Image: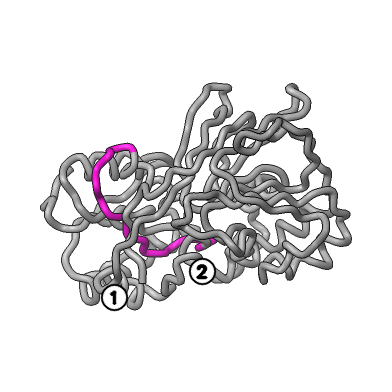
Amino acid sequence: MNGDASLPLVIVNPKSASGSTNENWAGIASDLRTHFGPFNVAFTKAAGHAIDLAREAADAGRTFIIACGGDGTINEVANGILLSGKDTELGVFPSGTGGDFRRSLDMPDTPREAARMLKYGKTRTIDVGHVTFNDFDGKTTSRYFLNISSFGLAASIIQRVKTSTSLEWLPLDTVRGRASFALSTLQEVVGLETTNVRVKIDDGEETPLTTVNFCIANARYFGGGMMMAPEAKLSDGFLDIINIGDIKTAKIILNIYSLYKGTHLSLPEVKDTLAKRVEARPFNERDDLHIEVDGELLGKLPATYEVVPNALKLRVP
């Protein structure tokens, strides 16, 4: 990779925020240079490319790599750093649709303030999640995640968001992201069906479980601002497990505001616990149950989740 390895590297997903990152890059770069300082830049060309770019940069001695894009881009850059095994620090420069990991960090959402934070912020070490699962070709693979992985309703919502064109008239910013997630949630719950799985938590017995949505959370938010795991902490050595059980469609619609406020844990159909390891598989082995990882559909059950304590250095406000 070209450039001065002593400078921070900004890995940019030009397709993030529905392409507005590419359209606005000149202004974004100007704010970064003015309020952060000199840097090198690399642009992603396809899904997964940021993993390779970050790993190569960390191996080459980069000590600070900044992800410019949405939660998927942040996930890929973090995976590249973690796979390198180097003590490289991750920075987040938000420019995506959902912006959920930024919310957990209380990151500013304007380019100018985000750039200042990257320059003057502090470094902390956080836990990450690790999930082993089957990809869509049936091959066993794995991925680190910073935010949340889930199966059930959330995976269906994300599939709808990724393919929806109904909100293209909205501005290319987080307004569209929030509206798209909210609309897709309402569309999905209308035809809601529960999912039957078998789950084993830590050293407990495997038990059958009915779920509308099952979340394994390292951070607090997903789905464009839903505070799914309001009590999650990035450095406590645990994953927060949230199960929304057999809850009727009407009740979900009536309580959807609670998902954004983080008050849904008081509902009787919602159960939460802490765990270091979770194993999940379909109750019926022939069922095809997709999982999402930091907002990206990557594969399907069965899956094994584990917390990796103190795994990643992160620049925070």
The local crowd at label 2, few if under 14, some if 14 to 19, many if 20 or more residues have their Cα within 10 Å, is some
Magenta-colored span: 83-99
Q: For residue 251: magenta?
A: no
Separation of disc 1 and disc 2 at Cα?
21 Å
Q: Check disc 1 and give the amino acid type.
A: Arg
Quadrant of image for the N terminus: top left
Q: For residue 88: magenta?
A: yes
Measured along the vertical axis of the image, is residue 164 above or below residue 202?
below
Quadrant of image for the C terminus: bottom left
Which residue corresponds to mark 2? 173
Measured along the vertical axis of the image, is residue 73 above or below residue 299?
below
Foreground residue, 186 or 122? 122
Labelled disc at residue 144: none
Q: In this rendering, would 152 be left or right of 87?
A: right
Residue 165 point in image, percent of width and height:
64, 56
Residue 130 point in image, percent of width and height:
48, 39
Which residue corresponds to mark 1? 116
Q: Which residue is drawn at 57% across and 46% down?
A: 149
Q: In this rendering, would 201 be left or right of 295?
A: right
Q: Check disc 2 and give the amino acid type.
A: Asp
Q: Can residue 172 be seen in this view?
A: yes
